[in-house]
Amino acid sequence: MTNIPETGRTPRVRIRLVVIQILVFSLLLTLGGRLWYLQIRKGDVYSEQASANNVQRVVQPALRGSILDARGVPIADNETRLVVSASRTELLTMDDDGAAVLTRLAGVLGMKPERVREKVRLCDAKTPQPCWNGSPYQPIPITDQATARQALQIRERAEEFPGISAEPVAVRRYPGPGGANTAQVLGYLSPVSDQEIRRAQHTDSPYLRSDQVGRSGLEREYDDELRGRAGVTRYEVDNLGRVIGEAESDPAQPGSNLVTTIDARVQRIAEYELNEALKEARKEWDRNTRENYKADSGAVVVMEARTGRVVAMASNPTYDPNAWVGGISAEDYGKLTGKGSNLPLLNRAIQGQAAPGSIFKVVPTTAAVNAGYPFDGRYDCSSSYSIGGRSFGNFESRGYGPISLGRALEVSCDTVYYRLAHKEWREDGGLAPKKGADDWFYKTAHQFGLGKVTGIDLPNEVSGRVPDHEWKQKYWEANKDAWCEQGKKDGSYVEQIAYENCRQGNQIRAGDSVNYSIGQGDTLATPIQMASIYAAIANGGTLYKPSVGKAIVSADGRSVKEIKPKAQRKLPMTKETRDAIDGALAGVATRGTAEWRFGGWPQDEIPMHAKTSTAEVYGKQTTSWFATYTKDYSIVLTISQGGTGSGASAPAVRKIYNALYGVSEDGVIDKEKALLYAPQRSLPKIGPDGSADLPKKAGYEPRKREIAAGGVLARTTGRRD
């Protein structure tokens, strides 16, 4: 074997190693340069492209649950309409912000171009209605009244209408069965806002951008139950928007149905009679102001006496809740909220507070008995009562001599209560109240539930007011500076009063006390509060929490959650006091101030109890109140600037009772004609399709909820969220 010298092969090996090293280094340098180019130089570009390969959500809106009356008649449900919507985000990508597209769309829909443009602008503090107050990323409905021909035109000419969709959508409907409006009780819907979405994202009931939410009434109070949960399908898409796979899918869950205590037939009668009472009151002459009564608003509550359940609740002026469906017009919005509208959105049954006047007298009557004054004692009912040179008179200045507290209720004698309240005011220390004073008249009002909300299952209830020492002090502290400033001007009577209030506005004066004793002065109450009190007297003394919801029924009808009546407290009276007041209120209807309105009533079979009220309001005409009850129902009706209780309000209440019990004008009872001779206890049966099995006497045809449109446009479509 030949040995090769080591020195002979070393140069070649070294050359090869150098070449290999150069190649490896070149490759590494090339790879590093490429990585720098991709990650640094072109990093933003590729990052943007990669971000386009993401998951897109397609939302399938949930069908909102129906609201049914106590017998299963829909008073709010859904119907399928062809809805034309615009994607604002897509329109804004166009050179003219979509102006040309919206103009062409207006031509197809037969609308004015400016009207269409108004629909898609966003609401803010400076933008009037109509405008869009929902999420700017959600398709904005232009109209829910599109015809099939209009929808087909938009779809067939899709290239002319980018960002515009036309599809069948379940839209809220307020059918008004039998003419029952029920507007303020039902409320209305509007799109969810971005702020609400952020606020609810960590709750058990998060919002999606496609959601409509309740803004008032039952729609708001039971929104979580009615709304259901929208379905969401998540698709993987590339940067061109092409679907490359389905990631996840959650089916839509329809909302539950709400069965209410409202009876649509009684509701219709209550609304009609309240409206007629207002019209009749405007025909009457007010001797004090020397003009006709304005009768500008009113409310009525019909309540089950033994449960606190509301059978009917009406407020006037009212509105059509369908005006909000699909977005409210500027004209309609102005009618509901503008100057001179008289606030029809206000539910005056729970939000209208006024001096209750004489229907309040059941409270001081109870207070007097609890303070030790015998119910059957003798109390002077003079035509007037003087305090410090000021005379406080009876209504129309009539006196009855010595009478009992029961008779004082029957004839509504003010001076009996003036004397009792003034005596108690002095015993409690007068202008310098004693520490630990009994304070019977104010304490009893709180025990009756006044001065705070009843807790009814409707939003924005107000509390009324009991003007006791605590309220008086807080009111003085809030207004003292303004009074003192006004009182520096030495002149008018108003300025003198301001100066007096500046120094002593936190004191309950003798005049304050006697005015309070007849439900006037600074005393305020709502119709729902007074209806609850009279219902409690009717049932033996239990004050119930008023309720409108009766049961929540799942969409398939298989799960029922009953909303049971809830007792809050007992009235602060013994059985003997309750029975005595009950007898006196029966006397109001048979021989007292309401006798002339209940002539021919079948008192033996259906004992009627009543209390009239004509409350004086500074600077306005008198407020008419009428509070009543039978063994089954309490009804309270009030008319602002309407005149007397027996004159303006009583006739309407009598007619509502006639309809409830089937009583003719001559007092004959026909139970076949009675709408609700006794309260209905059972729940309607809800079928698996969400419809109710109505009794044959319901007077309405059963109607299944519509969830799809027929024809070429009926295929299911989703909405990009």
Image (tube, helix red, strand yellow):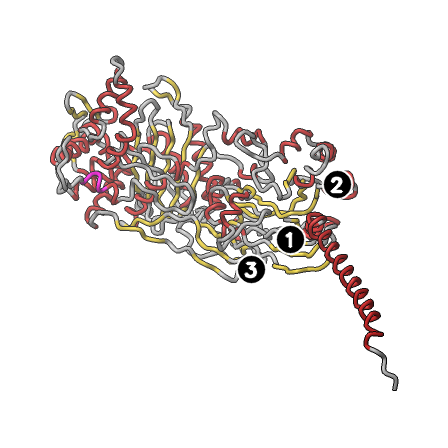
**Mark 3 surroundings: few (<14), some (14-19) or many (≥20) residues within 10 A:** some
Rounded to the nearest angstrom, the CA distance separating label 1 from label 3 is 27 Å
- Look at the image and give the residue range highlighted in magenta: 440-444
Label 1: state its secondary structure: strand
Going 63% across and 40% down the picture, which residue do you hit?
Answer: 140
Q: Disc 1 vs disc 2: which is toward the camera?
A: 1
Toward which corner of the image does residue 369 lie, by quadrant? top left
**What number is the disc on residue 57?**
1
Disc 1 from disc 2: Cα separation: 24 Å
Closer-to-camera residue (518/37) = 37
Q: Amino acid at mark 2?
A: Ile
Query: Is residue 86 in view?
Result: yes
Q: Position of residue 658 (x, y in %)?
A: 40, 41
Comparing labels 2 and 3, the label whose residue is closer to the camera: 2
Find out whether residue 287 is within the magenta segment: no
Mark 1 or 2 closer to N-term?
1
Which badge, 1 or 3, comes first in the chain's sequence?
Answer: 1
Task: Give the number of the disc on residue 715.
Answer: none
- Viewer-side residue, 636 vs 222: 222
Locate residue 497: give its quadrant.
top left
Residues at badges 2 and 3 in contact (C-beta under 8 Å)?
A: no
- In the displayed structure, would residue 397 be above or below residue 543? above
Foreground tag (1 vs 3)? 1
Circles 1 and 3, Cβ within 8 Å, touching? The answer is no
At a point 56% along the width and 45% down the height, the residue shown is: 212
Is residue 382 shown above or below 572? above
The residue that label 2 is drawn on is 154
Q: Residue 467, image x and y in percent?
A: 26, 34
Q: Residue furthest top?
A: 491
